[in-house]
Every structure is written in C-alpha cells, then in structure tokens.
Amino acid sequence: MASLFTPSPTTTSAGGDAVYVAAVPLKAAAGPPQLIMSMAYSLNLSYLQHFMVIVFDFQPRNPESIEAAISVLSGNLIPGVVLERRLKKVPRQRCWLVGSCKGNAMEMAIDFNNSWGTDLRVGVHDCRNYTNELVQHLTGEIQILERLPRS
C-alpha cells in the first residue's frame, strides 16, 4: 500500500479524483551511471530522484543518452518530453496521496501539459518544477515536494 501524505485540509475536496506523487530512480545509461542512480535512490537522496505525478511525467527526451547526462551535469537546456504513462496500480513505495482534484483530473492535466514548455534544465525547469506546478494546478496544493516525508 502506498504511504499517505496528509494534504492541507483547506484544499482537499471530497469526491475529486485522487492525485498521487511518486519518486522513482533517475534513468541513466547502463553500467556505472545506472548503478550510481540506483544507489542514490536507495539512500533516499531527494535531489537524485525523479518525481512524477501519477500518471504524468516530465523528463529528458532521451534520458539514457550520454548527451543528456552531459547537458544535465553542465546545466544546459536539453529537449524534454511530457509523457502519459499507463499504470496497472499505484506504486507501493515512495508514493503519496497529495490531494483531490478540483475538477476532471485528466482534462485538467492535459490542458496543463499543452502549455508546459519542454526545454528541460535541472533545478530550473525539471521534473520537480513540473510535479509541483501540476499538483498545484490540480489540487491547489503549493510546493508539494517540500512537504513530502523524507523517509
């Protein structure tokens, strides 16, 4: 079962679509880079995790390429992409219920995604910004990643 996060009582409405946030390991090229990313995820280093709103995700267009890794490390812009993922179930670990949607979650998320710029720059316009802003658009919750449990 996913661990629960208690959103602020002023913005959670009964009956809306549930909104979840998940943390997953960063993708990297096979070999040592992927091992490092997996270890960082295991150690719960939040700045080396990839955050997403279930079922939407913002990431580099080719996250496993060496060019993407160099661009990310140097702070350069890199082409990104918003993905819609099909999930059979909500992840069991590092997944939090963060609120209820103020309307039709899928329609609202698609509208948001259509206006989201896809040039990615780590720390400025990345998966954390995307997750925080999409959650705010859907639920009204502000800076949700800052309030998630660290364990």
Image (cartoon, rainbow, N blue to C red):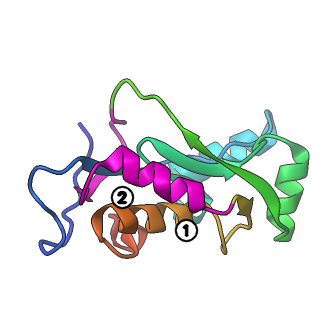
The spot of residue 145 in percent (x, y) is 42, 67
Element under disc 2: loop
Cα–Cα gap, marks 2 and 1: 21 Å
Depth check, front residue: 131 or 24: 131
The spot of residue 127 in percent (x, y) is 58, 59
Element under disc 1: helix
Quarter in which the N terminus is drawn: top left
| Kind of residue indicated by mark 2 | Ser
- Quadrant of the rendered image containing residue 146: bottom left
Residue ID for mark 1: 129
Image position of 27 (left or right of 55): right
What's the residue at 73%, 53% (across, down)? Answer: 80
Q: Which mark is residue 151?
A: 2
Quarter in which the C terminus is drawn: bottom left
Image position of 97 (left or right of 83): left
Neighbourhood count class around disc 2 (C-alpha, 10 Å): few under 14, some 14–19, many 20 upward: few
| Kind of residue indicated by mark 1 | Asn
What's the residue at 85%, 68% (across, down)? Answer: 76
**Magenta stretch?**
90-117
Q: Residue furthest left?
A: 14
- Quadrant of the rendered image containing residue 128: bottom right
Whether residue 141 can be seen here: yes
The spot of residue 119 in percent (x, y) is 75, 62
